[in-house]
């Protein structure tokens, strides 16, 4: 979802956001993990105020249009399908799952630090 923040707000399109960043020499970045989310701004001091206004709009008023949500969903499903063809990723996930199920005292029973928990089975992908 973080990727969608810069895809438009209720008052600015993604193109308008990109043009404003270019005009102001500003960069809005997003990142996140299982337990943190960050939205950052890099801007020149003279352009700080208008850059902060754009950042505030991006954070407070994301549009999350249905077409963009569906595009992101399809990308995520394609990524999962791609991962399921890579033996190293499958082995790592299966190993982690077994470790957590077999040794809860050392691995815990919660899949902390693992987005989405164990590997989803192909039949569950469309429920994402």
Image (spheres, rainbow, N blue to C red):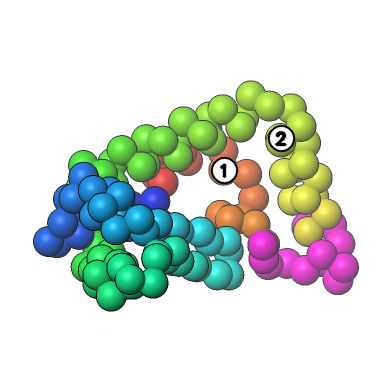
How many residues crowd mark 1 within 10 Å: few (<14), some (14–19), many (20+)? few
- The residue that disc 2 covers is 90
Earlier in the chain: of badge 1 and badge 2, it is 2
Residue 86 figure quarter: top right
* Rendered view: 108 above or below 99: below
**In screen coordinates, is 74 left or right of 82?**
left
Looking at this view, name the residue that lies furthest to the left: 11
In percent of width and height, residue 84 lies at 62, 30
Residue 36 is situated, as x and y percent measured from the top left of the image, at 55, 70
Does the magenta portion include 128? no
Label 2 packing within 10 angstroms: few (<14), some (14-19), many (20+): some
Tag 1's secondary structure?
loop
Residue 31 percent across, percent down from the top left: 51, 59
Name the residue rendered at 15%, 56% in the picture. 12
Q: In this rendering, which labeled residue sits more in front, label 1 or label 2?
A: 2
Name which residue lies at 82% across and 64% down.
Answer: 107
Which of these two is toward me, 58 or 95? Answer: 58
Residue 102 vertical position relative to residue 44 in the rendered view, above or below: above
Q: Which residues are magenta?
A: 101-113
Please give left or right for residue 101 compared with residue 45 in the image.
right
Asked which secondary structure carries label 2, the reply is helix
Q: Determine the image quadrant of residue 100.
A: bottom right
Q: Mark on residue 120?
A: 1
Q: Is residue 12 visible?
A: yes
Q: Classify the position of the N terminus by image quarter.
A: bottom left
């Amino acid at each position: 979802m973080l990727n969608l923040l810069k895809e438009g707000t209720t008052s600015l399109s993604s193109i308008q956001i990109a043009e404003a960043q270019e005009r102001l020499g500003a960069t809005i970045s997003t990142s996140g993990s299982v337990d943190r989310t960050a939205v950052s701004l890099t801007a020149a001091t003279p352009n700080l105020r208008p850059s902060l206004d754009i950042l505030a709009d991006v954070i407070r008023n994301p549009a999350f249009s249905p077409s963009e949500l569906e595009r992101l969903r399809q990308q995520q499903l394609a990524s999962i399908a791609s991962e399921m063809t890579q033996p190293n990723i499958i082995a790592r996930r299966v190993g982690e799952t077994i470790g957590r199920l077999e040794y809860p005292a050392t691995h815990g029973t919660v899949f902390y630090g693992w987005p989405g928990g164990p590997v989803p089975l192909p039949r569950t992908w469309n429920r994402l």
